Image: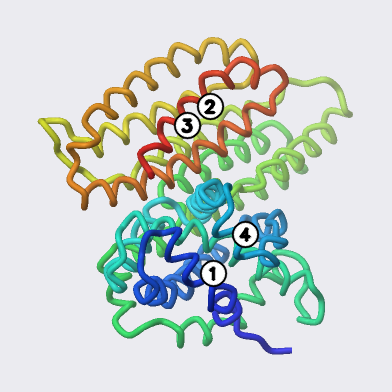
Amino acid sequence: MSFNLVDLVKGQLGGAALGQLGALLGEDSNKTESALGAAIPGLLSGLTSSAKADGGASLFNAVKDSDDSLLDNIGGMLTGSNSSSIMSQGSGILGSLLGNGAMGGLASAVAGLSGIGGKSSSGLMGILAPIVLGMIKRKLFGGGGGFNQNAGGLLSLLDSQKSNIDSAMPAGFADQLKSSGFMDQIGNLGGGVADAAGSAVNAAGDAVSGAAGTVGNVAGDAAAGVGNAAASGGGFLKKFLPIAIIAALALFAWKFITGNKEVEMPDVAGQVSGAADSATAAVSGAIPSIDVDGVDVGSAFGDVFSSASSTVAGITDVDSAKAALPAFGDITTKVDDLSGIWDKVPEAGRGALSGMIGDNVGTLTSGLETVQKIPGVGDVIGPVAGPLLEKLMAFTK
């Protein structure tokens, strides 16, 4: 049965929901409706490109994990006490799927076309994220659509919507997307991070090839092939490249040669970790530069998120969490200093910064949630990480 994904998403935000959305964003209904008309096809176009960059794996996982029950109570989602949390989480998810540069470009293009503020535009993306993902989930897993319930089926679903997405693009919006940098960011998903991932996996392939003879060469060639794909195709590490598959293949070859004896494996995880750190540090790259009293506020926030991301990336157990506490203290001090000059940031600049900060907070929150699943780590960093996130979220309001 045919359907139009753009219209289905737009239909969730019609009538009373449109007014509720405008109130949440602080914009009038006409501008909000105009922004929606651009944001929905723009976002779907970006997600389609993102999915193609890694075979649909990352987007499929996001769709599968999404809470599509939100679609049954859109009004509550837009007016409830957790609407800000939903918005922030949605921004974080989109930041991980599209990259913060593309997110910023899309928000800027939507704001330019519709006349809503930069902060409102970024907030709109965060609200649209669970709606879009939930609608895709229902079409993919609801049956009757004829799509396989896997990453390949997701790509087929998105391909079937190409003409609907293209025809829904408002006049002149393609030019806005190009001038905002969105098209360049989407066209180069993964970029240098993918190069780092490719190098790390190629190194794993070389290590296996050099030590394990014929079967080792097979595993090494396979690992090197995926590494080259990551470097040329874009985004495999950033889009959660399944390194475990390569490691398992290497381990199989190694044990086959050695008769399953205990051997010292090459440090594949260590090499991949270095590339992962590079991906995490890239979180802060899209924050604009704004000078206040000789302080580049944008750069200062960039340093905050870069430091925070690096600190989180270094936490692997309770001891490393304890060692990270002084760094969290330094970061919190920097944030307090920025609070002292925030009111001096021009309103227009504050809106642009707020959207980018919200995206970065979402990504940082995801990282913190991940490391706090390590036994004992949450008890150590929770008391400092929670207040830090609250301080950062204050800049998005």
Total labels: the figure holds: 4
* Depth order, front residue of 291/217: 291
Q: Nearer the viewer, mark 3 or mark 4?
A: 4
Distance of mark 3 from mark 1, alpha carbons?
Answer: 31 Å
Distance of mark 4 from mark 2, alpha carbons?
Answer: 26 Å
Residue type at tag 3: Leu
Residue type at tag 1: Thr
Judging by the rendered image, the residue that carries numbered circle 2 is 386
Q: Give the percent coordinates (x, y) of residue 233.
A: 50, 59
Badge 3 marks a residue whose secondary structure is helix
Q: Nearer the viewer, mark 2 or mark 1?
A: 2
Residue type at tag 2: Gly
Q: Are marks 4 and 2 in contact (CB under 8 Å)?
A: no
* Depth order, front residue of 150/115: 115
Badge 4 marks a residue whose secondary structure is helix
- State the mark number for residue 389: 3
Judging by the rendered image, the residue that carries numbered circle 1 is 48
Please give left or right for residue 119 compared with residue 387 in the image.
left
* Depth order, front residue of 157/245: 157
The image shows residue 322, relative to residue 211, as above or below, that is above
- State the mark number for residue 76: 4
The image shows residue 57, relative to residue 318, as above or below, that is below
